[in-house]
Image (cartoon, coloured by chain):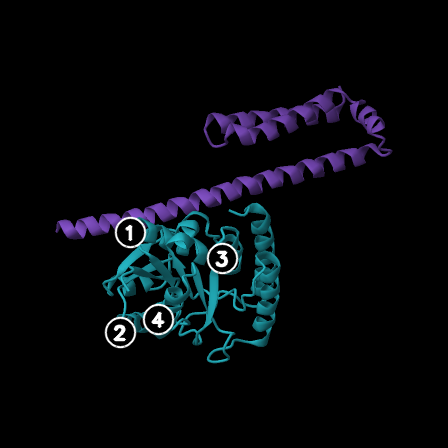
Amino acid sequence: MDKRILVIIPCYNEEASLPALLAEMRAISDYDISILAINDCSTDNTAEVIASADIASLQLPVNLGIGGAMQTGFLYAQEHHFDIAIQLDGDGQHPPSELHKLIEQHEKTGVNVVIGSRFIARSGFQSTWSRRLGIRYLCFLNRLFTGSNIYDSTSGFRLFDKKAIAIAADLYPDEYPEPESLVLFTKYRLLISEIPVTMRERQGGISSIRYLASFYYIVKVSLAMFYSFIRYTKK
Amino acid sequence: MARIQIIALSTSVLFLLYISYLIVKGRLREEYAITWITCTAILIIFSFWRNGLEIMSHFFGVYEAPNLVFTGAIFAILIYLLHLSIVNSKLHSGNKKMAQEIALLKARIDKLESSAR
């Protein structure tokens, strides 16, 4: 395959998991892959870890959250004319060994966005029941607003093609962007496909979504999806 | 002039002077000052016009005049808070764009510097 691929690794305080992740990334040689680490103003030694790794990196001067960080990555991908961007979280939940599944799915079907899902095949890390309940609700919301069945709309393990990169560079949501962006992509008539991948428990750091915050997450995402649904007219 | 009128008037005038001072010093933008100046102007009018509140209450059909004050004030505060949220959202998106631009530019400069070496 002659497409240029950019793997975007958004990092916020991931000094513990990042070295192993980058080592795994380097082991991949099947594709022409460039790596871009985005340090979202971490307060630990993430910046040093990235600097010592000899990869492209962006240092955000203020903390923008996952969406803002990813959008910066999309802007970079656009600026450097990459054909494909893949999001790989810095906490190590997304194993680089599964990357090829996303790429193959894109090659095979030509869809614009490929989502690596935890729920299609029941293997690997499945997360807690309350989180699964939340995800079921999000799945319902997703069916409501996009008309398609995406089981793991919160998964950040995604591949974006050139068209999706251009839209995301312009309009990617900044807080909890995963479910909301699916509404956006659907409105722009992008094709989305979901494939099963095996994910791991986070390798270090703490999840950004806990307890009370998960209630806020649900409310915020519901509102955001609803308003995205009415904001964007079908292109 | 009753004592309360003098107190209300002098407070309003002092407030107005302080707002003007902030604008002159460039610490308050005029568009945000409009609300404050309007509020002070209303206070000054009602300080002179003592029957004003009764007349306005009667006009709006409010039986207890002070209730009109509370309703009006709370409504004005809500609108102003909404306005501040809008300003804040605008700042937020501007700030995000700046941070992204800075990060991208920094990466470009680093690349240029390392290739020049």
**Which chain is tinted cyan?**
A
Mark 1 touching mark 4, by CB under 8 A?
A: no
Mark 3 touching mark 4, by CB under 8 A?
A: no
**Residue identified by numbered label 3:** A177
Q: CA distance from mark 1 to mark 4?
A: 22 Å
**Residue identified by numbered label 4:** A100
Badge 1: how crowded within 10 Å, few (<14), some, or many (20+)? few
Q: Mark 3 falls on what kind of element?
A: helix
Question: Mark 4, chain letter?
Answer: A
Question: Of the numbered discs in the image, which one, if any, rests on residue A80?
Answer: 1
Q: Mark 2 falls on what kind of element?
A: loop
Q: Which badge, 3 or 2, is on the more N-terminal residue?
A: 2
Q: Position of residue A180 (x, y in %)?
A: 53, 56
Q: Position of residue A163 (x, y in %)?
A: 40, 52
Q: CA distance from mark 2 to mark 4?
A: 13 Å
- Could you say which is closer to the camera, residue A167 or residue B94? A167
Q: Are marks 1 and 2 on the same chain?
A: yes
Q: Which badge, 3 or 4, is on the more N-terminal residue?
A: 4
Tell me if residue B45 comes above or below residue A189 in the rendering.
above
Q: Residue at x 44, y 58 (%)?
A: A66
Q: Are marks 3 and 2 on the same chain?
A: yes
* Image quadrant where residue A82 sits: bottom left
**Callout in the foreground (3, 4):** 4
Badge 3: how crowded within 10 Å, few (<14), some, or many (20+)? many
Tell me if residue A101 comes above or below residue A80 in the rendering.
below
The residue type indicated by label 3 comes to Pro
The residue type indicated by label 4 comes to His
